[in-house]
Image (tube, grey):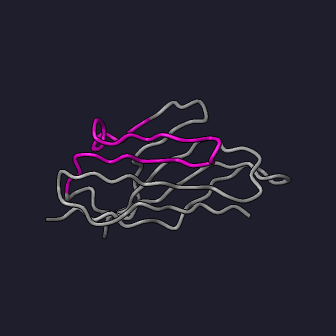
C-alpha cells in the first residue's frame, strides 16, 4: 500500500507564507509526476502546481510568481512554498503523485488534504 501524508497547513494572515509537505511511503518502486491541488468550499478541485520526475514545473495562473513546487526524490517528498498568500488561496490542499508499486500498474494516489486558511 501507498500513503501520502501532508503537513504544514494552518491559519496565516494575508501576505504571509506557508510551506506544505507531502511524504509518500509504502512499497514504492518509482514516483513520477507529483503535484498539489486545492478545493475551496463550494468549488471543484483545481490544479495548483505539478512537478515531473525531471523537475519540470507547471503552475496555475492564480499562483504563478507566488508559489513554488519542489521535490526531494531521496525522501519521496514534494513541497509547496506559498508566499504572498491571499484570502482566495483559502482551501483544502491535496497532494497527488503517480506511483509505481512493486507488482502493480502505475496509478495516481491522493493525500488526505490539509487546510490552509488565509484571514486577518
Give the residue furthest to the left: 120
Q: Is residue 87 left or right of residue 74?
A: left
The quarter holding residue 67 reads top left
Q: Is residue 33 left or right of residue 91?
A: right
**The C terminus lies in quadrant:** bottom left
Q: Residue at x 67, y 58 (%)?
A: 25
Q: Residue at x 57, y 60 (%)?
A: 110
Q: Residue at x 77, y 47 (%)?
A: 29
Position of residue 100 measured from the top left corner of the image (x, y, whole percent) = 74, 48
Q: Is residue 21 magenta?
A: no
Q: Is residue 73 magenta?
A: yes
Give the residue furthest to the right: 103
Q: Residue at x 23, y 51 (%)?
A: 85
In the depicted view, which residue is nearer to us: 74 or 36? 74
Count of marks overlaid on the render: 0
Position of residue 106 measured from the top left corner of the image (x, y, whole percent) = 73, 49
Which contiguous range is marked in magenta? 58-86
The quarter holding residue 37 reads bottom left
Position of residue 80 measured from the top left corner of the image (x, y, whole percent) = 42, 47
Position of residue 28 measured from the top left corner of the image (x, y, whole percent) = 74, 52
**The N terminus lies in quadrant:** bottom right
Q: Is residue 113 left or right of residue 26?
A: left
The quarter holding residue 5 reads bottom right
In the depicted view, which residue is nearer to us: 55 or 17? 17
Above/below status of 19 relative to 30:
below
Amino acid at each position: 500500500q501507498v500513503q501520502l501524508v501532508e503537513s504544514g497547513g494552518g491559519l496565516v494572515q494575508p501576505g504571509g507564507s506557508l510551506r506544505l509537505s507531502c511524504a509518500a511511503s509504502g512499497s514504492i518502486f518509482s514516483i513520477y509526476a507529483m503535484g498539489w491541488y486545492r478545493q475551496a468550499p463550494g468549488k471543484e478541485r483545481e490544479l495548483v502546481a505539478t512537478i515531473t520526475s525531471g523537475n519540470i514545473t507547471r503552475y496555475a495562473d492564480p499562483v504563478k510568481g507566488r508559489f513554488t513546487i519542489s521535490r526531494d526524490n531521496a525522501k519521496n517528498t514534494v513541497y509547496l512554498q506559498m508566499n504572498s498568500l491571499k484570502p482566495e488561496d483559502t482551501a483544502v490542499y491535496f497532494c497527488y503523485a503517480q506511483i509505481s508499486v512493486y507488482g502493480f500498474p502505475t496509478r495516481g494516489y491522493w493525500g488526505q488534504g490539509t487546510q490552509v486558511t488565509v484571514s486577518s
